[in-house]
Image: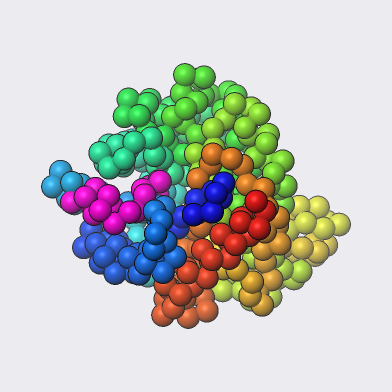
């Protein structure tokens, strides 16, 4: 690995692994193919996704088997995606991605704590990423109690719960992140309740990435990891993967002001000159209009000490992505690693 170049990993939620058997197939085949091609003499940093079914089947013996596999194949478990409890591929997801919600029951808390328990047996000090709240108009005060309980549990296990802002959630902007932590998170939990900063999410908000990260860190808020992700950018709302199983979360700006639609709008508004959509496009150049130039600028000077994980979970829906998944992931890793190395 080039000296001083940050390690770049990949989020395995791109693979349609809903069961433990499917996860093992993914790890033993495609993940090892990527490892051999991109990281033959290096550790491959990965983000696992835990579904309800996987968590249920990860008993002590399976956890030990998984730990042995990761250790003996130089796969570094940086983080676990505990965001989506139900199915994430192959069927309509949309708003279900946020369920169960933090404020409606203890189900999200129990699942998060179980993910933390498993993660603490696999590695030390890693993070579990979860939704930062629920869809608006749910308040910060409503989501805070169970989020704080999750942070307290993570502190007991020496792990981190990484809260992920996303367009449409009650915590979606950098201003709201800072407001939530200031009002609800005591200093004693700041090492164990942190933020998962997704470039695509904040680019959809038209935020300046370096400024947002600097403001979060200056507020004494830990950034547990950064998702390297690329959003769609459009000058008008022409059809764009409108049949996707995922929400589009469209934000627009223009003379008419700011516009937001949780999913693809039936009737595009007037007075909007630029739209950004929460749809993770490839993190390498294509003919699709996107925010890649801003991602490239960010990669020229990423923050020190924060893990970088590429997340393009929409590959199965685009550009024959499922047929060429290993090749596409290789291209993304190569492009991102090159941009970082050029900045050093």
In the displayed structure, 221 sits above or below 137; it is: above
Eyeballing the image, is 118 above or below 47?
A: above
Image location of residue 198, percent across then percent down: 56, 50
Residue 78's x, y, as percent?
40, 46
280 and 159: which is toward the camera: 159
Q: Is residue 238 left or right of residue 21?
A: right
Task: State the residue in front, 165 or 2.
Answer: 2
> Which residue is at the far right?
255
Q: Position of residue 26 (x, y in %)?
A: 30, 65
Q: Left or right: where does residue 19 sit relative to residue 36?
A: left
Q: Is residue 267 left or right of residue 70?
A: right
Foreground residue, 254 or 194? 194
Q: Residue at x 37, y 67 (%)?
A: 36
For the record, the magenta segment spans: 65-81
Magenta span includes 297: no
Residue 144 relative to residue 66: left or right? right
Q: Residue at x 44, y 29 (%)?
A: 192
Please report the residue visible at 31 percent of the width from the left and 40 percent of the height from the top: 123
Q: Please say whether residue 128 is visible from this viewpoint.
A: yes
The image position of residue 95, as x and y in percent, is: 47, 55
Q: Identify the residue at image location x=43%, y=73%.
A: 325
């Amino acid at each position: 690995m080039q000296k001083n170049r940050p390690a770049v990993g990949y989020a395995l939620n791109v693979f349609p692994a809903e069961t433990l058997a499917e996860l093992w197939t993914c790890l033993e085949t495609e993940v090892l193919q990527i490892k051999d091609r991109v990281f033959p003499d290096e550790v491959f940093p990965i983000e696992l996704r835990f579904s309800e079914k996987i968590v249920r089947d990860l008993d002590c013996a399976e956890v030990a088997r998984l730990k042995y596999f990761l250790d003996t194949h130089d796969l570094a478990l940086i983080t676990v995606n505990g965001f989506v409890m139900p199915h994430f591929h192959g069927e309509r997801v949309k708003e279900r991605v946020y369920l169960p919600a933090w404020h409606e029951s203890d189900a999200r808390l129990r699942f998060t704590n179980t993910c933390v328990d498993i993660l603490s047996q696999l590695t030390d000090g890693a993070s579990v990423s979860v939704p930062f709240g629920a869809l608006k108009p749910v308040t910060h005060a409503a989501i805070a109690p169970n989020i704080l309980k999750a942070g307290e549990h993570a502190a007991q296990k020496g792990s981190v719960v990484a809260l992920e802002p996303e367009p449409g959630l009650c915590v979606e902007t950098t201003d709201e992140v800072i407001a939530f932590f200031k009002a609800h998170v005591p200093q004693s939990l700041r090492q164990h309740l942190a933020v998962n900063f997704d470039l695509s999410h904040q680019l959809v908000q038209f935020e300046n990435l370096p400024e947002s990260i600097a403001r979060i860190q200056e507020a004494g808020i830990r950034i547990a990891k950064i998702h390297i992700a690329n959003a769609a950018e459009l000058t008008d709302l022409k059809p764009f993967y409108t049949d996707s199983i995922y929400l589009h979360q469209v934000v627009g700006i223009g003379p008419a002001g700011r516009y937001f639609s949780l999913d693809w709008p039936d009737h595009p508004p007037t007075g909007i000159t630029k739209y950004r959509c929460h749809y993770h496009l490839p993190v390498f150049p294509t003919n699709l209009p996107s925010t890649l130039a801003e991602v490239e600028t960010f990669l020229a000077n990423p923050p020190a000490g924060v893990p970088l994980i590429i997340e393009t979970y929409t590959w199965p829906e685009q550009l024959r992505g499922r047929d060429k998944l290993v090749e596409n992931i290789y291209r993304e890793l190569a492009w991102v690693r090159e941009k970082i190395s050029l900045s050093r």
